[in-house]
Image (spheres, rainbow, N blue to C red):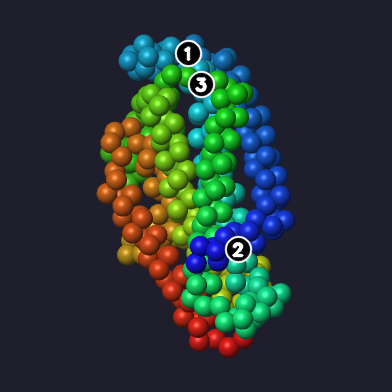
Amino acid sequence: MILSIYHEIVKLASQKKHYIMLIGFAFLVFLMILIFRHIHEDLQKASGDMVKQMPFYLQLIAPDPVKLCDGLMFSRFTGYILFWVVMPIFAFMFAGESIAGEQQDWTLRVYLSRGFSRTKIVIAKFIAVFAVILFYSMVFAALTMLIGITFFGLSKMQITLFWGNPGDPSQMGTIGLVTAKRAIFAYFASALYASFAISSISSVSFMISVFVKRMSVAATGGMVFFFVSFILQAVFSQYAKEIEPFLITRVMEGYSQIYAIEAVDWSSIAKSVSVMCIYWAVCVTTPVVVLNIKEY
C-alpha cells in the first residue's frame, strides 16, 4: 500500500498543472503586497484619528495601528483567499483527474489487467491527493508568512482578523489583541484545518471521477457542488436549516473559528471534522464499490 501511495504521489507531482498553481500563488501574493502597501499608506494618513476612536485599553497597547498591519496580518488575509478560492480549484483538478484521467488515457485498464487490487488503487489515489493538498497548504502558508514578515515586519501584538465565533452572534463585532505567538499558532492550525476541509471538498470530484471518463467533468462537478453549497448557506440558509450543518462551506467555517479571541470552540470544530469524515467515507467507498463491479 505504501508503495502504491508513493507511485500515485509521483504521478501527481509530474503533472504540469503544478506550474499553473505556483504561478497562481505567486500572482496572488504579488497582488496582496500591492494592496497592503496601499493599506499602509491609508493607515498612515488616518492613524491619529483611528487611535482616538479606539477603546482606551487598545490605545495603551497599540498606539500605532500601522504596526498592527504587519506580516502576520498580511499572511492571514492572503491565506483566507488562498484556502477559500485558489486551493479548492486545484484540489478539484487533482481529485478529478485521479481516476477519470486514467480512464481517459486508458492507463487504468492496464493497471487492472495486471491484477492490482481495485480497493487499494482507490485508497492509494485518495491518500495521494490528500498528501498533495496537505503539502501545498502548509508550504504556501509558510511562504506567505515569510513573505509577509519580510515586506511588512512583525509586531509583538496582533489584532484578530476573524473575531469571535461565527456561530455565536453575541461575539460578533468585538475586537481584541493577541500575542504574535498565539497568532502564528492560529495561522498554521487554520492552514492544517483548511487542508483537511479542502480534502473533503475535493472528495466529491474524486467520487465523480469514477463515473466519467473526462477529468474536466469530474473537476467541474466538484466545483458546482462547492458553489451551490456556498449559495445555499449565504442566501438561503434560513430555508435550509436541516442540511446547513452538512454543507461543505459550513464545514470550512472552522477555519475562522480558530481565530476566536476567547477559547476556541473545539466542540464545534469536532462536529465539522465529523462531517468531513462522512464526506470521505461516502466519496471513497463509492469509487471502491463501483470500481470493483465495473468492467473495463
Q: Is residue 21 left or right of residue 196?
A: right
- The alpha-carbon separation of the residues under discs 3 and 1 comes to 13 Å
Question: Which residue is the site of mark 2?
Answer: 7
Query: Compared with residue 85, is residue 113 higher up or lower down, i.e. above or below?
Result: below
Q: What residue do we see at 72% from left, 56% from top?
A: 16
Does label 2 or label 3 sit earlier along the sequence?
A: 2
**Residue type pointed to by label 1:** Asp
Q: What residue do we see at 40% from left, 54% from top?
A: 251
Q: Quadrant of the C terminus?
A: bottom right
Question: Which residue is the site of mark 3?
Answer: 154
Residue 209 lies in quadrant: bottom right
- Local crowd size for mark 3, using a 10 Å CA cut-off: few (<14), some (14–19), many (≥20): some
From this viewpoint, is residue 242 visible? yes
Q: What residue do we see at 61% from left, 19% from top?
A: 41
Residue 158 lies in quadrant: top left
The secondary structure type at the circle numbered 2 is: helix
Question: Which residue is the site of mark 1?
Answer: 64
Query: Compared with residue 229, is residue 54 higher up or lower down, i.e. above or below?
Result: above
Q: Which mark is residue 81?
A: none
**Residue type pointed to by label 3:** Leu
Q: Nearer the viewer, residue 226 or 196?
A: 196
Q: Position of residue 103 (x, y in %)?
A: 65, 76
From this viewpoint, is residue 96 visible? no
